[in-house]
Amino acid sequence: MTREMNENDFIVSKTDTKGRLTYVNKIFIDMAEYTEEELLGKAHNIVRHPDMPKTVFKLLWNRIQNKEEIFAYVINKTKNGNAYWVYANVTASLDERGNIIGYYSVRRKPNPQALQIIKPLYEKMLQAERSGGIAAGEKILNDLINKEGVSYDELIISIQK
């Protein structure tokens, strides 16, 4: 079953530098169908859905480890095997000297029209990854970006509006 976020909901989480959850808000707990105790200290990928291309996570980690924010569409899996889509914004949390001390993510309900573009794109990327690894998934994504003549950020942000 696919769950859906409410229009005004925001899922918020924080992780340490290894991606282990250090904070989750009530909406995260409710959507993920876990208790706070089951989430805190666990890797954020506890909610990773098998339909999520590895390419997107590679891009996400590259960006946030370089202290760059990223927006991405993500399908998550709940404790009970349900799924839910989010439009995520992820940034590095920095100390006063500019060192990364963790990561901060805010997710909201994705635009349904955006998912009409993202779902088939992710399916193509997953198929490509199965035979050619992450590089094959990256090629699918880069081909679309080049065809549209925009950057990754411009594409993702424009379809959310």
Image: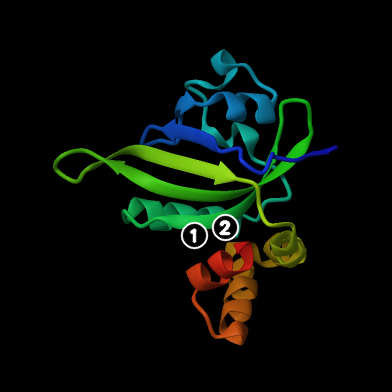
Above or below — where is 142 with respect to 27?
Answer: below
Task: Please name the residue that numbered disc 2 is placed on.
Answer: 56
In the image, what residue type sits under mark 1?
A: Leu
The local crowd at label 2, few if under 14, some if 14 to 19, many if 20 or more residues have their Cα within 10 Å, is: some
Q: Where's residue 33, x and y in %? A: 70, 24
Which residue is painted at 55% across and 44% down in the image?
Answer: 107
Which residue is painted at 71% across and 67% down in the image?
Answer: 128
In the image, what residue type sits under mark 2?
A: Val
Q: Quadrant of residue 137?
A: bottom right
Camera-side residue of 45 and 150: 150
Q: Where's residue 64, x and y in %? A: 39, 52
- Secondary element under disc 1, as helix, strand or loop, is helix
Camera-side residue of 141 and 130: 141
Q: Where's residue 129, x and y in %? A: 68, 62
Q: Quadrant of residue 96?
A: top left
Which residue, as the protein is rendered here, is positioned at the far right? 1
Horizontal arrangement in the rendering, residue 124 relative to residue 19 (left or right)? right
Above or below — where is 151 with respect to 131?
Answer: below
Q: Are marks 1 and 2 in contact (CB under 8 Å)?
A: yes
Horizontal arrangement in the rendering, residue 143 relative to residue 122 (left or right)? left
- Secondary element under disc 2, as helix, strand or loop, is helix
For residue 59, the mark is 1
